[in-house]
């Protein structure tokens, strides 16, 4: 009998977990992956990134047709109606195809799927259901779950989390979203487009905490224009459900008189927390920090030799693409190679319309570190955006005043999520604003706005 059942055992099949398992198998290591869901892919593919984007896209098309925007382009559709069941069906179909794709990749790469949930029984062993296995290396990639709001019960009928908000059987007349972050704004946008009144309650004075200040202000202005109501600097003190409706009690975050808001549904979207409950980390000699995260070193190794951790359970932004990069890197480190992730250059994207994306430092943070130069270019000056009748937003580039090295890029436009990749790659290679300004960009494209913003850093844009 072999000393170990696996060279690498990955706990969790989300973006980081399944990528780590596949890369480890590709590197010749006997690999298993533990997953208790009916399908692989974790939160992202099952109830997160993928299904929400399916609804975002479908709701964008519905609004475009129903609002008369297509008619202005010469496309006449007649009366437009919503088939919510069909919209949900295409979401589920997208999930089925992608989760099934991971199962295919596991079989192709000879990764064994251990069906169930894992709990450590020692530093190199875990129990999955009735089966106990040993692994030379164990990678914790269990992801995250919704952060509860104290005193507010999520029943997934009236009061829902992000999973429940994907499954609403009818369009609410009024949806109250608690939290003005990425998840709340994306899902709030979906239901606003198909007919719901949406009110976002945010504890801070502005939405999108952690994003550049100009972006936060512009985004809130655009969302208000679209019909979303905001109550910023406001805290929720209670939610009472009665007769299939909710009464939300709010008051100013800094103190003041309370008021109530009546809603058909309430979405709790105040953040996410690492999934470590049930892992029995103590048996492996591990503990979590004050934020419930597992501490790691630069190589993703925990304090226990042979135990590694990646993704949402470790410090850093809770983003699927961060977890994927870490999954590749940890597998390569286990195999004796050099796996590195530049955590200073992890792009963030909000898939509203327009999209919002950023990478690197905000202007506020950059100013705290030294003298900077800033260039901005409005999408109203971009020929492709103008032709597409989508001129909201801008591109903003922040550069070091002395070296001209790009420190941060922030974008609001319809395809910001795609555009940010160019900025991230340029910054990875240490690009200056001049490097970007003198790089030829295809015409007519939205990406020309990045070139113009780079030119604006030195006060030389053409189309302003």
Image (cartoon, helix red, strand yellow):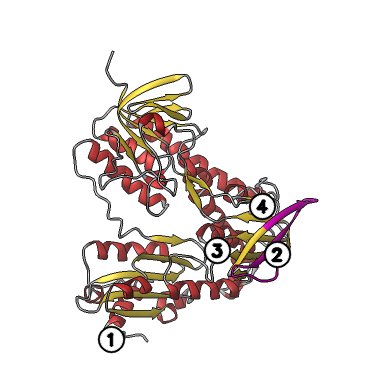
Could you tell me residue 36's position as x and y percent?
Answer: 49, 31
Closer to the eye: label 2 or 3:
3
Could you tell me residue 321's position as x and y percent?
Answer: 37, 51
Identity of the residue furthest to the top in this view: 1
Residues at circles 2 and 3 in contact by the CB criterion of under 8 Å = no
Q: Which mark is residue 460?
A: 1
Identity of the residue furthest to the right in this view: 243
Depth check: give the residue in front, 301 or 426: 301
Residue 93 vertical placement versus 135 (above, below): below
Which quadrant of the rendered structure holds the C terminus?
bottom left
Classed neighbour count for the residue bearing mark 3: other residues with Cα under 10 Å, few (<14), some (14–19), many (≥20): many
CA gap between label 2 and label 3 equals 33 Å
Tell me the quarter of the picture where residue 455 sits.
Answer: bottom left
| Bounds of the magenta segment | 238-260
Tell me the quarter of the picture where residue 380 sits.
Answer: bottom left
Tell me the quarter of the picture where residue 74 sits.
Answer: bottom right
Closer to the eye: label 3 or 1:
3
Reading the image, the residue beneath label 3 is: 180
Reading the image, the residue beneath label 4 is: 84
Q: Earlier in the sequence, mark 4 or mark 2?
A: 2
Closer to the eye: label 2 or 1:
1
CA gap between label 3 and label 4 equals 25 Å
Could you tell me residue 146's position as x and y percent?
Answer: 54, 48
Reading the image, the residue beneath label 2 is: 79
Q: Is residue 92 within the magenta segment?
A: no
Q: Earlier in the sequence, mark 1 or mark 4?
A: 4
Depth check: give the residue in front, 19 or 137: 137
Q: Earlier in the sequence, mark 3 or mark 4?
A: 4
């Amino acid at each position: 009998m072999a000393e170990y059942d696996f060279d690498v055992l990955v706990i969790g099949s989300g973006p980081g977990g399944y990528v780590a398992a596949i890369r480890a198998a590709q590197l010749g290591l006997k690999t298993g992956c533990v997953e208790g869901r009916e399908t692989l892919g974790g939160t992202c593919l099952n109830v997160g990134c993928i299904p929400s984007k399916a609804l975002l896209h479908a709701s964008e098309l519905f609004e475009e047709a129903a609002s008369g925007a297509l008619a202005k382009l010469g496309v006449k559709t007649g009366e437009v109606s919503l088939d919510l069941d069909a919209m949900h069906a295409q979401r589920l179909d997208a999930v089925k195809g992608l989760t099934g794709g991971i199962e295919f990749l596991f079989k192709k790469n000879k990764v064994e799927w251990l069906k169930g949930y894992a709990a450590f029984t020692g530093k190199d062993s875990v129990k999955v259901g009735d089966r106990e296995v040993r692994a030379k290396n164990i990678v914790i990639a269990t992801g995250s779950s919704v952060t509860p709001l104290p005193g507010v019960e999520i029943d997934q009928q009236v009061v829902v989390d992000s999973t429940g908000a994907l499954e609403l059987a009818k369009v609410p007349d009024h949806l109250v979203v608690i939290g003005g972050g990425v998840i709340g704004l994306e899902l709030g946008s979906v239901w606003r487009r198909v007919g719901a009144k949406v009110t976002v309650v945010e504890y801070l004075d502005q939405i999108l905490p952690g994003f550049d200040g100009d972006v936060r202000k512009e985004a809130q202005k655009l969302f208000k224009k679209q019909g979303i109501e905001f109550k910023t600097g406001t805290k929720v003190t209670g939610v009472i459900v009665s007769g299939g409706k909710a009464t939300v009690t709010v008051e100013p975050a800094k103190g003041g008189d309370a008021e109530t808001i009546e809603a058909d549904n309430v979405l709790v979207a105040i953040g996410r927390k690492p999934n470590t409950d049930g892992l029995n980390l103590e048996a492996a000699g591990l503990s979590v920090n004050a934020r419930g995260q597992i501490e790691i070193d630069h190589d993703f190794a925990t304090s226990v030799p042979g135990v590694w951790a990646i993704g949402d359970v470790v410090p850093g932004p809770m983003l699927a693409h961060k977890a994927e990069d870490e999954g590749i890197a940890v597998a390569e480190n286990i195999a004796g190679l050099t796996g590195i992730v530049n955590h200073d250059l992890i792009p963030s994207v909000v898939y509203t319309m327009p999209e919002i994306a950023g990478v690197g430092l905000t202007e506020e943070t950059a100013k705290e570190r030294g003298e900077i130069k800033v260039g901005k270019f409005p999408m109203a000056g971009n020929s492709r955006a103008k032709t597409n009748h989508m001129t909201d937003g801008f591109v903003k580039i922040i550069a070091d005043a002395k070296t001209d090295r790009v420190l941060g890029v922030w974008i609001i436009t319809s395809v910001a999520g795609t555009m940010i990749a160019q900025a991230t790659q340029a910054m990875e290679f240490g690009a200056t604003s001049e490097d970007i300004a003198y790089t030829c960009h295809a015409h007519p494209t939205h990406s020309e706005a990045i070139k113009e913003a780079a030119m604006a850093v030195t006060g030389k844009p053409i189309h302003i």
